[in-house]
Structure formats: C-alpha cells, structure tokens
Amino acid sequence: MQQNGDGEKALEQTETPSQRRSKDSRGGASPYVAADMALERANSSRFSNSVEHLVAQRHSLTPSNLFTPIQFIPLTTSQSLSDSSQQTLTHPHIGSTPHASPNVNTISSPLDTYPTNEDFDDQPQPIKQKFRNIYEIMEATRPFEALMADFGPETIDEIEDNEGDIPLEDINLTPKAALNGPESEMWKSAMQTEMEALMRNGTWTLVPRPKNRNVISSKWVLTKKKDAHGVVTRYKARVVARGFSQIPGVDFKETFAPTLKMVPLRVMLAFSAGFNLELHHLDIETAFLHGDLNEEIFMQQPPFFEDSKFPKYVCKLHKSLYGLKQSPRMWHHKLHTFLMSINFRRLQAEPNLYIRKEGSDYVIIGVYVDDLPIASNSTTSMRKAINQLKEKFPVKDLGPLEYCLGIKVTRNRTEGTLTMSQRKLVEEILHKFEMSDCKPIATPMTVPCKLSSNDSPKTVEEEQLMKTLPYRQILGSIRYLVSCTRPDLSYSAGFLSRFMQNPGVAHWNALKRVLRYLQYTKDIGLTYKSFQSRNSSQLNGWLQTPLVGWTDSDWGGDLDTSRSTSGMVFTFADGAIAWRTKRQVSVALSSTEAEYVAAALTAKEGLWIKTIIEELDIIKLNEVKVFCDNQSCIKLAINPKITDQNKHIRARHHFIRELVEAKEMSLHYTSTTTMWADFLTKPVPQQKHWNCCNKIGLSISKINKEK
C-alpha cells in the first residue's frame, strides 16, 4: 500500500470543517469532528450568567461538544441565585429526592454533587481558575440543598430522553443521579454492602465533634467493574474521604506506597508461559479499609447514611479509608507484614514481587494495590497460599488470570503460548475520540517524518483550533498502551509527546495516523512461548542466556535539538518484556557515541531485569546477551581506549564497559536488517516495522485487510 501521509496532511489543512465532516461520514480519516463543530459554534455560543446554567452546561457536555471552549462568567456575591426556578433546565446529576430506603437519607454534604477540579482538567488554566472562584461564591451565598430544590422530579426523565446512547457511567455518575436512575436498586445494594463492610471492619466510631480539630468531609464514589468484553460484573460503591483537606504533619506524615511495575509483571507472565506455570488472580475486597492508622483523624458521616440518633456526631477513624493520603501506604504495610509472616520473601529489585519456596515448589505473588496475580509450579502450594490470604482478608477469587489492569491474558495450553492484549482499551480510545470508523493503516508514522517545532501554530486561528483538540488526552491514552503491551507505539508516542506543549495541525494529523494504526492493530498481542516447544539441544543452550536484548540509536534525528534517540528491547520466552524509547540528553558527535549512550541505557535496564530473575532463583543466568549494529560501539565497550573521538563521553555512559568486564553482559554484532530495536528509534518502512514486531513477539491474530 502506498504511504501518502504528506499528501494527506496537505489536503486536510486546506479542507473546511464542513468538508471534513462530509468526508468523515463517508468513512474517511477526517480530523476530530467535534473540534471542528466546536470551533464553528464558539462565536455563537451564549451562556447564562447564573450558577444554575453554569452547572447545567458543565454536565450537558457529551462527546460531540466535549472540547467546546466554555465561557465562564464570574459572579459577584451580590448577584441573586434565586431566579433559577423560572428556567427549564436538564441536569443529568440532579433529580428528585432519592427513592425511600430505611438506610438512605437526604444528602448532607453541600459538596457531594459539585463538579470537581478533575472535571475541568481539559480546560485552560484561566477557565479552571474561574471555575474555582464561582464555586467559592456558591458555597458562601447559598446551601447546595437549596439550590437543588429548584429542580423538579421530572429532571431525570428529561435527561434520559436527551442522553441518546451515552452510557450513564460516562457522565460522571453521582449518588443522586444513581438513586434516581433505572439501576437504583443495584446502587442501593452496593452502598449498603459498603456500609456493612465498614461497620464489620470497625472502621470508625461516632463521637461528638471535637473542638479545634480538622474534620474532613466524605463522599460516595460509584463505579461499574467490567470484564474483558465490557460486560458489567459488579456495581461498586465506595465511601471516600476528601483527603485534600488533610493537614500535613497533623493528619498524615509519610504517604509513599510502591506499586508493581509493568516490566516485573511481564517477567512473571513470561515465566508462567516458559515454564508452564499455573496462573491465578485474586482481588482483595475493600483493601484500603484494612490498613491501621497511626494518626487521629475525624471525618463527617457518609452522605445518605447519617445516624438518626446522633446526626451531628462525626466519625473517629480507626482504619484507613479510600481518599486518605496515607491509605495506600497503610494497606501496603499491612499486606507486606502478613506475607512476610507466612514465609514469603520480598524481592529487593522489585518490592511488589514476593516468592515462597518449599522444596522444589514455589509461589510468586505480584501486588498491584488490591490485584494479586499469582504464579506457581504447584497447584497444592498455590491453593495453600490462597487459603492463607482468605483467612486474613476478604478475598474475591477470580480464578485463572484472564483480565488484569486492563490487560486481557489468553492462554493456549495446546500450543504453549500466553498472549497479552488490550483490544477493549483500543476500542474505547477510538470511540472516545470519534475515530471508530476511520480507515486503518499498517504503520504508525510516515517515512520519513520531518516534524519539528516549526510546525507549531503560527496564527491566532490555528492556536484557537489546537486548543479545542484533545492532543494531550489521546497521547496519554496511547502511552498507557505503550507501557503495557505495545512496544510498536513506543517511538511514535514518545516523538509526538515532544510537541505536547504547543502542537500544530501537522502534529495533530500525525497523531490521527497513530489512531488509524490502532484501528489496524486492534487484535495485536504480545505472545510468550513455552520452553518445551524447543528441542533438547536448543533448550539447553537457550537456558544459558534466556534474556536477550537489542540496542540501537539514530544519529541527530531530532530536528529541533540535533539529539539522537535511543531504543532498546529485551525478550524472554520469545516475547518482549521490556522496551524503551528515549531522546538522549546531549548531542552525540558521532554515530558511535550515539550507539554507546544507547548501550548504556540498555545495560541499566538489562541489569535490573537480570537481578529480578536471579532473585527469583528459578533459573541460573550467565551473561545477558545484547545485540548492537555498530562495530565501533562494541569495540569501545570492550577496550578502554581513549581517542579524540570518545574522550569527551561522560563517565556514566561507561557503565556498559564495567558490565562487559564483569561478564554480566556481552555485546554482539548484528546487521541493521536484523536489528529488532530499529523501529524504536525512528519510523521505518512497513516491511521492517512488521519484521521487528514479529521478532519480539507482537503478532495480530485477526488482521483487518482493509488498508
């Protein structure tokens, strides 16, 4: 297929918004339609200066107008807020009084249904500041309950008629809307279950409100938990403390809690595929409620569940609670202490991986907050560990690991493979940014790609247009894919992130091409293979050096700084377990220097992975084999020779030389045609791109043939 990216960009820059929308309706790869529509409406939009209209306008945002520039008009304290009853408003979060329930009362927290600062993260800073000012005035002039009383019971019905096919959970669902909606019974049950868990756990006791003490507020957070197919499996309701009002040094001290990184998780899954281990998945219910607090903290009673006898009392917390600054730390400490008490050993290289050995049997547990993937070579040992956890914590046994952290895990025992994929997340990204019907394309970037800061906006009109486009939001979504299962997007995501502060139309068109590539690769997955698929001679040789890396660099490829871009990838069990694309911090004076700096980056990552594998103590590693396509770089790493060409190289880059001398790592030459990290340093042609993908375990099970 011909790559005509430059022609596409030139055409799209000359099209009018109407032409682009017409093109989009025919299935073409158009710009973001909502942004064009928003730009056309910007000058004609009219907004009332009443707070009620402000709130309604915020909550009437849908995917078709989400990025419309909103004009906020500041209020003064002298303005009246009592005229709202004369207006007809549809507010998706405000309705009639919640359905009667013995455990559900009227809302008591005036902040419960306020839009939060996070709701306006996509707006420019001046808009967010006006938003804060307006709600400070609202708090000072009128109780929120009185403001809500202006809305009649028909509000929710009007909203349901006007919502169309927008999922309810995508509209920042509030307790009041949930209790007035069609799923009210499920939400009531979830809220009641949460309160019962809190009471059973002894989370707090009611005490008179103390004088001269900080009392933080609380709120309900409602979410739906879905499986890999998007089917709702659970309605979750959480009482959340508003931790932003905690006082440092009084209400909390240390807050840090480690979280399992993706590289150790992939190491764990690669081990499971390679050695045919059993994989299981546990979920600790109400995890943060099990942490023990060291500080004395007071909190308002949860909305809807105020004690009828002591409505003015407050909660003195004994256990940690969602929303508290120190909750993650307290929960991690509790779980760590328990795992150590049952003879698990924590890895020094990754504090969220634990292993327990009993003879030849071993169990590995990964800890990602309340998600616990477990791997073991013995069903008996695994079941013993699971039962011990169930005795200590309320554990939901999810069975064999199939879906974790947005990643679908598919196991084929017959072929001895394990595949990680994220089709559901890709579809959500395409749907969210209205690219579900875009035409797929086989590479993420054009070759060559000559974008630079010179392509940033040069006119006021272009600046205003770019402010309406979700450039940062799309990149953020793509970067999560990169961190989990998509090394093929590592370079494109990193390269386009360089222009995040001031992107232009050319950068936007390049980002849309990445979305078209996502459309093409919905079903791509990262596959690890069993070692048993090799013959005995291959297996014996392979187990000596199962960890293999590739290191590469371009030279001066960045048009703005003339810096080079390093790329590296490591494979284990025939699949990538670590990859990285990074622009170098200084200008390289030669290709040898650029490759040498990239090799040092690769050495640091390789040593970390090697340490993790050695601490697991399942197999014995010799040296880590790393391939490089630059002979001079290899010679420089082996021989400490000082010349005019290398004497200026900073000492920290000679780290690779120490590892080579200690025989912990060895550099081997490979030609550029077999350099599988090449697509992590620059855009490459389609054939080379897919060769690199296939060699590091990326493959598509079902390819959309349309290009």
Image: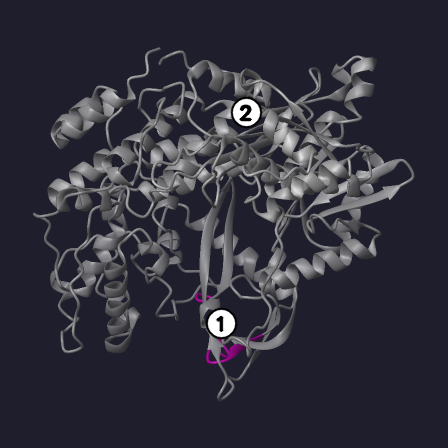
**Can residue 23 be spotted in the picture?**
yes
444 relative to 368, above or below: above
- Is disc 2 surrounded by few (<14), some (14 to 19) or many (20+) residues within 10 Å? many
Measuring from the top left, give residue 674's x and y in whole percent: 57, 17
Measuring from the top left, give residue 24's x and y in whole percent: 22, 25
Q: Is residue 314 magenta?
A: yes
Residue depicted at 41% across the width and 26% down the height: 518
Quarter of the image where one finds residue 57: bottom left
2 relative to 180, above or below: above
Q: Which residue is mark 1?
A: 301
Quarter of the image where one finds residue 333: bottom right
Say whether residue 272 is left or right of residue 384.
left
In primary-sequence order, the first of circles 1 and 2 is: 1
Magenta region: 301-316
Q: Secondary structure at mark 1?
A: loop
Q: Name the residue at the front extreme.
A: 644
Q: Which residue is mark 2?
A: 525
Give the amino acid at mark 1: Gln
Measuring from the top left, give residue 539's x and y in whole percent: 79, 18
